Amino acid sequence: MDKNIMLKQLSDPSEAVMLDKAFSSHFEWYRQGDYYERCLRENREGSRITLMAFYGDILAGCCHLLHRSKYPYFLEHNIPEINDLNVFPKFRRNHIASRLFDEFESIAAQTYSHIGLGVGLYEDYGNAQRMYTSRGYILDGQGMTYKNQKVIPGQPVMVDDDLILYLIKKL
């Protein structure tokens, strides 16, 4: 385990503001708003766990564990979902994502028999695809989804961040 990595659960409004600002400065696609305020509320309600990762004392990214996934198969089978993993580019390759996954798998194993996640299908998700399979995640067998709806053969879909395959892991 890397001693430089510290995880902390989102618990304070100032942390939500910090995440919002950090994500807007690290990712062009991120638009500031109330996302992390909603995450804080859900952390307090117990429906989500948001872990912030620090490398030394610098925020390096975060990830979430959803106890009730929006993906119908996970919801029906009581499978929590690791969601929205993001490590800031300059901190990648430092085992931060693995450390977040270790923690979420440990938390989930106390209550659940499986854990799941979704991954995009285009090249930008290549590193994530390799990491998830190397950690023992396997396809859930339900096929692709678009905006959490099954993709119907012969019907067109947009290849974007909403075209997802879901994977599961037995804990």
Image (spheres, rainbow, N blue to C red):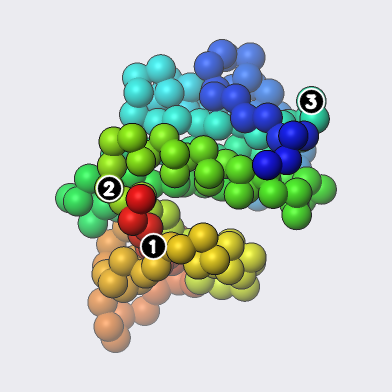
| Above-or-below relation of 23 to 129 | above
* Crowd class of label 1 (few under 14; some 14 to 19; many from 20; radius 10 Å): many
The three-letter amino acid code for the residue at tag 1 is: Leu
- The residue closer to the viewer here, 71 or 98, is 98
Whether residue 145 is visible here, answered yes or no, is yes
| Above-or-below relation of 139 to 67 | below
Say which quadrant the N terminus sits in: top right
* Res 42 quadrant in image: top left
Q: Identify residue for label 1.
A: 167
Residue 160 shown left or right of residue 143 in the figure: right
Q: Position of residue 73 (x, y in %)?
A: 23, 56
- The residue depicted at 37 percent of the width and 39 percent of the height is 108
Mark number displayed over residue 57: 3
- The residue depicted at 68 percent of the width and 30 percent of the height is 6
Mark number displayed over residue 113: 2
The three-letter amino acid code for the residue at tag 2 is: Ser
